[in-house]
Amino acid sequence: MKPDIEAIFLDVGNTLRIVLKDPEFSEAAKQQFLELLDVKEDPEVFFEKLETRWKAHRKRCKQTLIEASERELWSVHLLPDYPKETIEPLAGKLTRLWRDKDGRRVPRSDVKDTIIELDRRGYKLGIIANTITETEIPDWMETDQVTKYFGTVILSSKVRVRKPNPEIYWMAARELGVEPAKCVYVGDNPVRDVEGTHTAGYGMMILINEPATLEKEPPTGEFKPDYTIEEISDLLDIFPSRK
C-alpha cells in the first residue's frame, strides 16, 4: 500500500537540472577564474593542482558527510596558499566559475510545469541538495520563477550536513512540519539518495534514471527505490491530487 505522502523533496543536480557540454562557455569560466585570482603560473599546472586538492576534499566530504561552506572550501581546502582575507570575499564567485567550467546547467524541460502542478495538487515541496554553492540554486529558482512553490531549500553547503546523513532529510521534514513517513525524496543517485531516504524513514524514494550518474555510481543492490522514472513529469502519474 502506498503511504500517504504530504511532502515531496527534490534533488537538483542531474535531477531537476542537467549539465550541457559547452566548450566555449567552459573555457570562458576558466579564464575568468584565472583572472579573478591573477594567476601567474601555467594554467594547466594550476588547474591540475586544484583538481588534485578538489578530489581529496570531495573524498573527505563523502567519508565524513560534512560539507564545507564556500569560504572554508576555498580558503582552507582548495587555495590555502592564498591569503585568507583575499580568498574569502571571492568564494561565491570562485564556486560558480568552478562549476561553470564543467558546462552549462539547465533545467529539464518539464521541471517548471511539474512543480506548478504538484503544488496545485496540494503537495508541500522542498529541495534537499548536496552542493558546494550557496547561491546557484536559489538564483536558478528565482530566474525560473519557481521559488514560491518551495517551502524549504536545504543545501549542504549552508547546513554543513551531506546526504546520505539522515539529519539533512529530517531537517527538511521539520522545516515543512511533515513527519518523515509522509515524505518522499526524488533524486538521481542510486546509492547515496536511496540509502539516505531509507535511513531517514521517508515513506518513499523515487529515482530518476540519469545515465551520467549511473556511470559514476552504479547501484549496489543494497537499497532499492520504490519507483524509477524517466522524466520529472512522471511524478504526476504517481501523485494524484490531495484536494
Image (tube, rainbow, N blue to C red):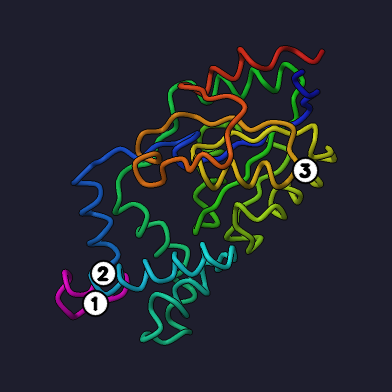
Distance of label 2 from label 3 (alpha carbons): 42 Å
Instruction: Please tell me whether mark 2 or mark 3 is closer to you in this view.
Output: 3
Asked if disc 1 and disc 2 are in contact, CB closer than 8 Å, the reply is yes
Residue at image mark 1 = 39
Question: In terms of secondary structure, where does tag 3 sit?
Answer: helix
Q: Amino acid at mark 2?
A: Glu
In this orientation, does residue 68 appear?
yes
Residue at image mark 3 = 173
Please state the horizontal and vertical placement of residue 28, each as a whole percent of the image: 23, 54
Numbered mark located on residue 60 in the image: none
- Give me the residue at 52% from left, 72% from top: 71
Mark 3 nearby-residue class (10 Å; few <14, some 14–19, many ≥20): many
Please determine whether, in this image, residue 187 is positioned above or below residue 155: above
Q: Main secondary structure of the magenta part?
A: helix
Residue at image mark 2 = 35
Magenta stretch contains residue 45: yes
Q: Quadrant of the C terminus?
A: top right
Please determine whether, in this image, residue 107 is positioned above or below residue 46: above
Question: What residue span does the magenta drawing correspond to?
Answer: 35-47
Please state the horizontal and vertical placement of residue 197, each as a whole percent of the image: 66, 42
Q: Quadrant of residue 34?
A: bottom left
Question: In terms of secondary structure, where does tag 2 sit?
Answer: helix
